[in-house]
Amino acid sequence: MIRIKHKIINMNLFPKNFGSIVFLAIAILFLFFTTGCTGDKKHDDLKIPSISPSIPPPATPGIILSKTIKEGNKFANRPYEDALEGHAKAVLDVDFTPDGKIAVTVSDDKTVRLWNVKTREETAILDGHDDSVTCAAFSPDGKTLATGSFDRTLRFWKLNREDPGSTKTFREYNAGKEIFSLSFSPDGKYIAISGSDPVIDIINAKNGKKVFELKGHRESVNCVRYVGDGKYLISASEDATVRLWDMKSKGKKCKIYKGARWPLSSADLSPDGKTVAAGTRNRDVLLFDRESGKITGKLKGHLHGVESVLFSPDGKYIISASLDSTVRIWDLKTKKCAGILLWHIFDVRNLCFSPDGKTLASTSNDLCARLWDFKDELKKAPKKLPDDFATEYPGKHDLVEIINIPQGAASFVTFSPDGKYLAIGNDENAIYIRDVKAKKWVKTLKGHADGITYLAFAPDGKKLVSASRDDSVCIWDIKKGEPVKFLRGHKGEVLVVAISPDGKYILSGSEDNNVILWSAEKFTPIKKLKKHTASVTGLDFSPDGKEFVSAGYDDNIYFWKMGSSTPYGKIVQYKSFGMDLDYSPDGEKLASGAGSCVIEIYNVAARKRDKKILSYKWRVTSVRFSPDGKLLASGSFDKNVTLWDTTSGFYHDILKGHTSDVHSVCFSPDGKHIASASDDGTVRVWRIAEDGKSGSVGGTSSSR
């Protein structure tokens, strides 16, 4: 838990109108034929990293279709003849050939698909990438297709118009990084690619070799695009800046646009070259004056992060795609919303105009790309959202109990290993033990002189370890309700504790920047680890107890072997503002929830990011894997508990009810319940649905 001292949709299953009934029938038939009749197993691999990064789709086609019917954007009831539909997972990008006759889509399902734009028929499925295909673009002459992927490769395909199915890869470039975005120069000589590092690569499109690099961004680059007839390359980055690179000077001349307070997903330059538009993770579209670099406008209206921005070919409008499932059209002159396109059921990921500017294409987590007549849609699109429009799930999990703690704000909560008790700490000096089944208090533990920051049960459930702002750690006898021993050794508030799976060791982390390893049997310090240069906020033992991890305000996650005084590995999570850590039950993954509003899931063996999830608006205070590792729960300053599918990275549900910051979340050992602690003075206990569609959980749990 990160403790900071200062501070979707409900859709009726039984539609009343005939049109909705037809849509329901089509969706059910599609579900039946795609999941029940094809026998196609090639998309069963559920490793879906997040692009750009952002919230990915649900785990399987069956799940997303059931959500489409029940909880999706119920206003997205347009017929499927307008869609390019066939992918098994989220569609991430779309592009047109120069003549507009062929479209390409790429997806988390690792495939590249070609389409006849006129008939909307799929003409080819191109396999070859080993991971999510994130971006695609046709060369200006229409003869070559380039695709980028999380498998770190840029592939060149020779387009066969007569027989699209025979389109083959003729060249491959190893980028050495996950590729998020690519763009051909207007003369077709170069391809710019960006991805999971701060460097933009400029590739010779003819021989597939790197020509030069553009360096300047400090974090991953989410978008690159040639603009201004190829004179410039525009880029948007996680470092919250847009850069406009002069390509004649090979990027030596570069205009930087600052002022955004959030990471940027996308950027574009107006056709007249006067305005820069950028999409932010916190829902806004920012407008900059190209020459002065000053912010000239903020387009507000989206309910969630903006994934893509694009100027219309005539320069009159800005189009933005959002995780709120909508596309908005903004009048550049008035800076007001000119129309909202309620086309998609889930997150909209990317936008593209056809070469003649008449058709707007959008891609989405709802497994399709949609093609629409832009002018026609603009005429009839509403300028405001319907009153009952919502973008969050109504909650598939029952609220079992609201526990009002006797005093103060609830700072931490954890289940006992047998699931019979809840231990709840408050921001003053008390720990309350509650019988879960009887729903009554059984013990109050007092002895600390200041607020409780963290709690951990011993594996046998007989003892509880607490961390406090009084600079101490305490070991408690649960049965007696008395302290066994206070462990004093830190010279600052103790923010986190962890106990080893065998119960023999205790870790504590403090504002004094140190980690202390204690003997839980002798109550003595074994060693003090002084690697961090700022407050230590996260600690966890691996499930086998052979190693542990630590994290702090210095943005570093260190990996330690038991018995060693030196870490064997490190991950840097830039501008984390403190992190909470949790190992997956199998020990293969590590989740970190950061004050920078980001959740990262790392591959432990490789010590590299597996997925990145954004909470978009608020600090993440706590993260916990479910006992089977299928779900990740997070608590946040947004007052909610959010459940994430760990395979896809898609948010599974949002549990609402707290009226203030949520500081701690935990699963019960059997995985059937979640408890959350909040500044509102309550702990809420939720029952996890077991309908299969909501990702039921089960198994065994650690004592955390």
Image (tube, rainbow, N blue to C red):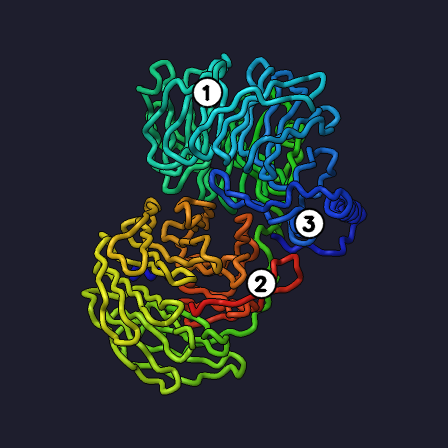
* Drawn side of residue 1 relative to residue 30, left or right: left
Distance CA(mark 2)–CA(mark 3): 18 Å
Residue that badge 3 annotates = 62
In the picture of the structure, the residue carrying the numbered disc 2 is 697
Q: Earlier in the sequence, mark 2 or mark 3?
A: 3
Can you see residue 272? no
Whichever of callouts 1 and 2 sits on the residue coming sooner in the sequence is 1
Q: CA distance from mark 1 to mark 2?
A: 48 Å
Disc 3 and disc 1 in contact, CB within 8 angstroms: no
Mark 1 nearby-residue class (10 Å; few <14, some 14–19, many ≥20): many
Specify the amino acid type for callout 2. Val
Where disc 1 sits, the SS reads: strand
- Label 2 sits on a secondary structure element that is loop
Relative to the observer, which residue lies in front, 185 or 658? 185
The residue identified by callout 1 is 227
- Residue 1 relative to residue 535: left or right: right
- The percent coordinates of residue 461 (x first, y second) are 42, 77
Nearest the viewer among 646 and 295 is: 646
In the rendered view of the protein, which quadrant contains the C terminus? bottom left
Q: CA distance from mark 3 to mark 1?
A: 40 Å
**Kind of residue at disc 3:** Gly
The local crowd at label 3, few if under 14, some if 14 to 19, many if 20 or more residues have their Cα within 10 Å, is some
- Label 3: state its secondary structure: helix
Q: Residue at x 58, y 21 (%)?
A: 157
Q: What is the three-letter code of the residue carrying label 1?
A: Val
